[in-house]
Amino acid sequence: MAEHPAADDATAATSPSTSPTSADEPWWRQAVTYQIYPRSFADSDGDGVGDLPGITERLPYLAELGVDAVWISPFYPSPQRDHGYDVTDYCDVDPLFGTLDDADALLARAHELGLRVIVDLVPNHTSSDHPWFREALTAPPGSPARARYLFRDGRGEDGSEPPNNWTSVFGGPAWTRVTEPDGTPGQWYLHLFDAGQPDLNWRNPEVEAMFEEVLRFWVGRGADGFRVDVAHGLVKEESLRDQRVAPAPDHPSGDEQAMMVTRVDDDEPMWDQPEVHDIYRRWREVLDGLPSPDGRPQDRMMVAEAWTKTPEAMARYVRPGEMQQAFNFAWLQATWSAEEFADVVTGSLAALADVSAAPTWVLSNHDVVRHPTRYGGGPRGLARARAATITMLALPGGAYLYQGEELGLEQASVPEDLRQDPAWFRSGAETGDPGRDGCRVPMPWAGEAPPYAFSPSDGAGLRDGQPWLPQPEDWGPLTVAAQTGQPGSTLELYRRALAVRREHARGASEQVTLLSPSRGEATGGDPEVLAFTRGRLLVVLNCGDAPVELPAGEVVLSSTDLEGRLLPPDAAVWILRE
Ligand code: NOJ
């Protein structure tokens, strides 16, 4: 049996405190935000795809769950090639999801219930069906219409080679060649994602002006904040030079083999350029300067989706005068290891303290494999997921939850012929990576069989009784209805965790003192146990194989049933010390 972490360990590492908590702190600083993927949350009209009225109907469930805010993935008009992250009009709602009136009703109902609403902004690219891109296709090279995007001539004698060697995040080249209006093969345009998502040229003032209007539009309708998609990608190195790639061992002359060789990861002329920060400073001024539509305090926020390489790079997005939050993906990328978790906590807190910003924590979203599956799946994966979640909820700052994680859903397996993710079509079929559909399967609300009250069961849009992505046949015990009131269910754990967080974590010191693991032999910290304190609150996460004896104090939250004072493997606990 392992020793319990010594709560008074003199050599414990204490993180720098970000800033003291206070009653008048901005709403987002310690908020728990629940991500809604609108296609898959609730379908009110039976077409098999979720919609805004469906969300509005279910908002009381979220208020009762105990979250503070919702972030809604894009619901703008879109051909849905990347399920809404390909926008044709930033100031409207896709008929698939409803109308602007439905958006207004959703915002009003959320506010009535005390929930804030974060709208997803997609500024890196439009859809290729956006009127600007259509105009660019009919306009000549060098025209103002093309200057809103990144059009370039191709390389090679007849321009038939892409302008540089960049690849799309979804696989394949990041360039597509257009056919000019006279029918001849023409220029190329850049798309860091799907070919249906042409990248905008953020050095063009028209682009900047358009998005400032979009911010004003949604704030005018009551939005409380914006999640900024691909925040690290908007500006590219101006030359659009080749990415430096390392020669593959069997191809020493790397240049000729540019598309085939291993990339040098630290040369990224398309990501995290210094100029992106100028954009967020301007947006901050715009948002801070807007009057509130209904007299609510003007504390709108932005959260960056920026996949940065270091905590310091992440912290640059939340410097004073820029965004308020950035997703801390390092927490989600850590493997099941107390040492890795500890490194993320200390590294993130230190980097954010340097810029006086509050941290955020997240384990799942619509782009990654659900965390019970990442931790190995089955009962053990779920136990670990529950433990990681309550550990995250004890940390200072904001936390983001993804719909369905409160039910302990695993990544579903979606048959090949029903997959929809563009990443699957661009590369997954070759690499064997099934893509992101498995975390986007519609929510099970009630009942024993699909559509589990996600859609009305006689919905005209259901195929073989299934919504747009098929739900597993064995989700009956996982529905909201089945788990409600069930002691030990994951849903009840989340409800309790959020309530206990309000009571014991929100007012606690923001200073995190790490007691374990420790690498110094002198401290006796267990390398497989993460333990930290925030004032009176002590949190212990057991990543090892042996039970851990817990120190004295009242157990206020536990990811599993405890036998006496022993914390089993794959479990976590919150203890209130005397
Ligand atoms: C990040 C979004 O979360 C993801 O779903 C999308 O495919 C890309 N950005 C492109 O917009």
Image (cartoon, rainbow, N blue to C red):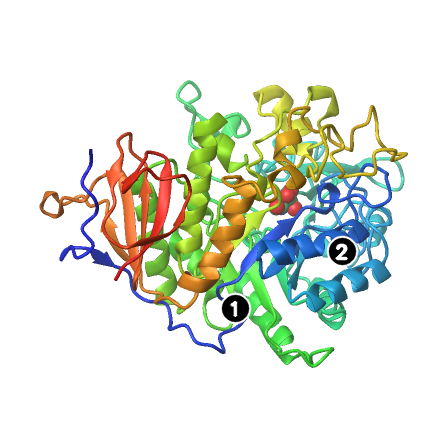
Q: Quadrant of residue 483?
A: top right
Q: Is mark 2 within 8 Å of ligand 1?
A: no
Residue receiving disc 1: 322
Q: Residue at x 63, y 73 (%)?
A: 287
Q: Which image quarter holds the N terminus?
A: top left
Does residue 152 appear in the picture of this structure?
A: yes
Q: Position of residue 516 (x, y in %)?
A: 23, 47
Residue receiving disc 2: 56
Relative to residue 372, is residue 280 depicted above or below? Answer: below
What amino acid is found at the position of numbered circle 2 in the picture? Thr
Q: Quadrant of residue 535?
A: bottom left
Q: How busy is the neighbourhood of tag 2: few (under 14 within 10 Å), some, or many (20 plus)? A: many
- Quick check: which quadrant has ligand 1? top right
Does residue 142 appear in the picture of this structure?
A: no
Which residue is at the front of the view, 103 or 76? 103
Disc 2 versus disc 1: distance between alpha carbons? 31 Å
What amino acid is found at the position of numbered circle 1 in the picture? Glu
Q: Position of residue 156 (x, y in %)?
A: 65, 33
Given the current orientation, which residue lies at the most extreme top position? 250
Q: Residue at x 81, y 42 (%)?
A: 79
Under circle 2, the secondary element is: helix
